[in-house]
Amino acid sequence: MSVQVISNEANDADLPSVSITMLGAGQEVGRSCCVIKHRGKTVVCDVGLHPANNGLSALPFIDELDWSEVDAILVTHFHVDHAAGLPYVMERTNFKEGKGKVYMTHPTKAIFRLTMQDAVRIGDNSNDPGDRLYTEEDLNNAWQNIIPVDYHQDIVISGGLRFTPYHAGHVLGAAMFMIQIAGLNILYTGDYSREEDRHLVSAEVPPIRPDVMICESTFGVHTLPPRSEKEEQFTTLVANIVKRGGRCLMPISAFGNVQELLLILDEYWDAHPELHNIPVLYASGLAFRGMQVYRTYIHTMNDHIKTRFSRNRNDNPFAFKYVRNLKDFRKWQDDGPCVMMATPQMLQGAHSRELLEKWAPDRKNGLIVTGYSIEGTMAKNLLKQPEDFIGMNGQKIQRRMTVDEISFSAHVDFAQNSSFIKQVNPQHIVLVHGEASVMGRLRLALQSQYADSDVKIHTPRNCEPLTLTFNSERVIKVIGSLATKHPKPTQPLAGLLVQKDYSYTLLDPKDLKDFTGLGTTEIKQRQSLRVGVSWEVIRWHLEGMYGEVEEDVEDDKAVFRIMQAVTIIHTSDQELTLEWVSSVSNDMIADSTLALLCGIDSNYATIKLTSKACDHGHEQETHAPAHPHPHSLAAKRKAPSDEKPGPIKADPAVLTDIQLLRTFLLAHFGNVSELVTEELEGKEEELLLLRVEVDQHEATIDLMTMVVTCKNPALRKRIVSVLQMAQTTISSLSSSFRSTTYTLENPAKPAATESDKDASAQDHKDPASLGIESTVKTEA
C-alpha cells in the first residue's frame, strides 16, 4: 500500500486544532473531568467528585459545558474522584437532551453500581440535605444507560470519532482510552500503574502513537521503592504493631488496593503461625459484596491469578484463609490486638474515622496510610504528624498512635511515568491529576528530558482551555489494484478519491464496491431538437467549431461524435438527438454543441452554403457544402503542401500543422530550415526535425518529443515560449481536449525531462501524435 501526502500547509484554512479543558483535576487531585473538543466533536473523560468536599462543591465545574453537545463520556475506572459525579451529569443536567453515550469497561460498570449505591446511602444519612446529589432512582437510570466495552474493542461513535480501551492497571477494570477524532490520536491515561501486582496486569503501551497524551502526575518526580521492599516494610510494620499489643488501622477504599492488601496479609499470616490468633478484619460490606465481581472477572487479571484459577476452579484467590469480613461493625468486640481495614480511605467519616478517634490516644496503636491522600482530607493532615486533631463532634483528640505511610496506591512514580511517556512518544504531553507544586516539578523534569526535541509539555488549570494546533497533513491511502504497482516519482497516479470520516482513500473505480461497499451511478443525458439544414451542413459547422468530428452509423442511423464526449444522432430529416454521459467537461461540450445547433438555421454561413441562384420556382432544397470547413482536419489533409515527396509517412494534416508551426518560427526568428529527417540507428523510424539559426546560434527542435536542444540558454528559452504559443494557436478544440484530459484506464504519460531525451527519441510515437499533444521541453 502506497501513501501520498496531498496537503501539508501550515496556513491551511483547514488547520486542525484541539481544545482541552479541565473541569476538574487541573493542577489538583480529585473530581477528574477532562473535556476534549475537535472538529465539532466533544468527548468528556471521567466525571468525578472531590473527596475533600461535599454536595455541589464536590462536583467538577460542570456549568462550563453544554452537556447536550457531548458525543461521549468515557470513564476510566470506578473510583469516586473519577466516576461519582456521573449520575448527577446524566440525570440532573441537559446531557439527556443530547445524543451522547457513556462508556466504561464491564468490570468498571459492575463495581460502579456498588460504589454509587454506597455513596447514595451516605448522602441519605447526612444531616445536610445539600450533600445529597442524586437519588437511588437517578443512579439506576444512569447505570442502565451505560454501555460496557471490552479491552482492545474498536468503538465507532459517529463520523470521525472512535476510541479503543487499553489496560491501565491501577484497579480492576481500569482503562486508558486511545481516542481518534478526525484522524487526531489522543491518549487519556486516567490513573494507571506500570507495576504488576498480585492480581492486576500493568498498563500496556498502545500500538498507535498519539498526537496528544493526557496523563496523570500524581507522584510528580517522586520515585517509590521496589515492590518487594514495600511489601516487606508493610508486613513488618503491621506485625510490630500487633505484637506490641496494639491495634493496626488501615483506612481503605472498598475497591482497589484493598484486594491487593488482603492477598498480601493472608499470605503473610499463613507463613507466620505466631500471628494466627490475631484477627485480620475488613469492615466494609461494600468490599465484601465486591468480591463476587472480582471472582467474575478473573479473566481480566494477570497470569498469576488466571493460572491459579485454571488449575483448580474451586481455588478462589479471594476466598481468604485468615482474613475475614466484619459483617456487623456495631456487634464487634474490641478486646485486643487486631488488624482492621475500614472505609473510607480519606478518614472523612464512617468506620475508619470512628476507629481513628477511638484508637488515636493509645501509643501501642498504629495508623498505616496505604493509598494516596488528597490535600484537605484527614488522612493527609495526619501524615503531617500533628499532636492532636478535631473529632467529628468538634472536640480535640490527642494523637499518640503512630502514623506511617506505605503507598500501594497503584499510581506511577516518576521513573515509571517518564519511561511510559518515552515509549508512547507523543507530540504533546498534558499533565493532570496532580497538585500544582508536584506537577510543576514534574514538568521541569520532563522539559529537561525533551530539551532537544519538539515535544511540548502543558499543565492546564481548571477551566482554562488549552488549544493545540497541528500541521495540516492529509494523507491518501492507495488501495486495491492501484496499489499493486509502485508509481514512479514523475508518474501521475489517477483514481477515485473516497473521503470518509476525515480519511482519504484512492482506488480504481472497479474496486469501489469490493473495498468500500459503495457503487457508482452513471447519468446519461439526452436532448432532442429540430433543425432545417442538411446533415452535411451540420457536419461543416461542427468541424469548424471542433476541428474533427467522428462519423459512424448506429442502428441504421448516422451519428457524429464530438470530442469523444457528445453523440449526435440523425433521428429524422429535421430532428437530431444529443446524448452524453454527464460530467463537468461533457456537460460543457454538450452546452456548446447545443448552442451551435440552435443557431445553425440563421447562421450567415449556412445561408451562403445552402442558397442557389435560379430563375425558376422549385421546392426548397438543401445543398451539401462544396468543400470542407477550412479549420477542419479534412481541410488540412486536402491542403497543398510545399514539402517535397520523400520517405516521411505522416498524416497530411500533421504535415500541415508542421508547416504552420514553421510559419510561426519564421515570423519570430527568420532563419528556419525545412523539415529535416534523420534516421535512427537500428530503427526503421525517422526523426522529424526543424533547425532555427539566430546570430550564429543554432537550435534543433525534435518534432517527435518537442525537445529543444540549444547551447544558448536565452535562445532555447525563447524558442520554447514560441512553440507553446504556436501549439495553442494551430491546434483544434478537439485535439486540445484530448491532450489535456486523461482517463483512469489510460492516464497520460508524464512529460519527458531533459535526461529522457535519448530514450524518448528511440522510443518515439507515430508522427500523427505531433502538435498540441506533445509537451515542449528543453535540453542544453
Image: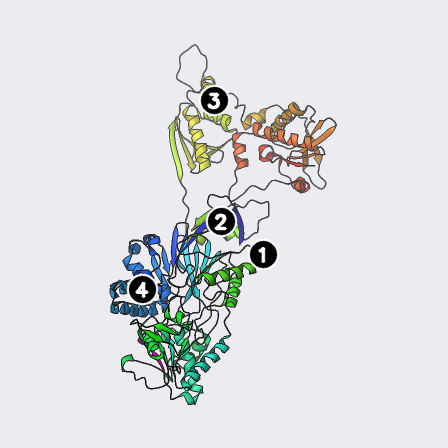
First in residue order: circle 1 vs circle 2: 1
Residue bearing mark 2: 506
Question: Looking at the rendered structure, which numbered label has been put on residue 624?
Answer: 3
Residue bearing mark 4: 54
Q: Secondary structure at mark 2?
A: strand
Q: Position of residue 209 (x, y in %)?
A: 50, 59
First in residue order: circle 3 vs circle 2: 2
Q: Secondary structure at mark 4?
A: loop
Amino acid carrying mark 4 in the image: Asn
Q: Position of residue 59 (x, y in %)?
A: 33, 60
> Crowding at label 3, few (<14), some or many (≥20) Cα neighbours within 10 Å?
some
| Cβ atoms under marks 1 and 4 closer than 8 Å | no
Amino acid carrying mark 3 in the image: Ala
Q: Is residue 500 above or below residue 571?
A: below
338 part of magenta stretch: no
First in residue order: circle 1 vs circle 3: 1
Quadrant assignment, res 396: bottom left
| Residue range of the region highlighted in magenta in the rendering | 280-287
Question: Looking at the rendered structure, which numbered label has been put on residue 452?
Answer: 1
Residue depth check, mark 4 versus mark 3: number of the one nearer the observer: 4
First in residue order: circle 4 vs circle 3: 4
> Crowding at label 4, few (<14), some or many (≥20) Cα neighbours within 10 Å?
some
Q: Is residue 147 above or below residue 664?
A: below
> As drawn, is 591 to the left or to the right of 702?
left
Residue depth check, mark 1 versus mark 2: number of the one nearer the observer: 1
Amino acid carrying mark 2 in the image: Leu
Q: Residue at x 50, y 52 (%)?
A: 479
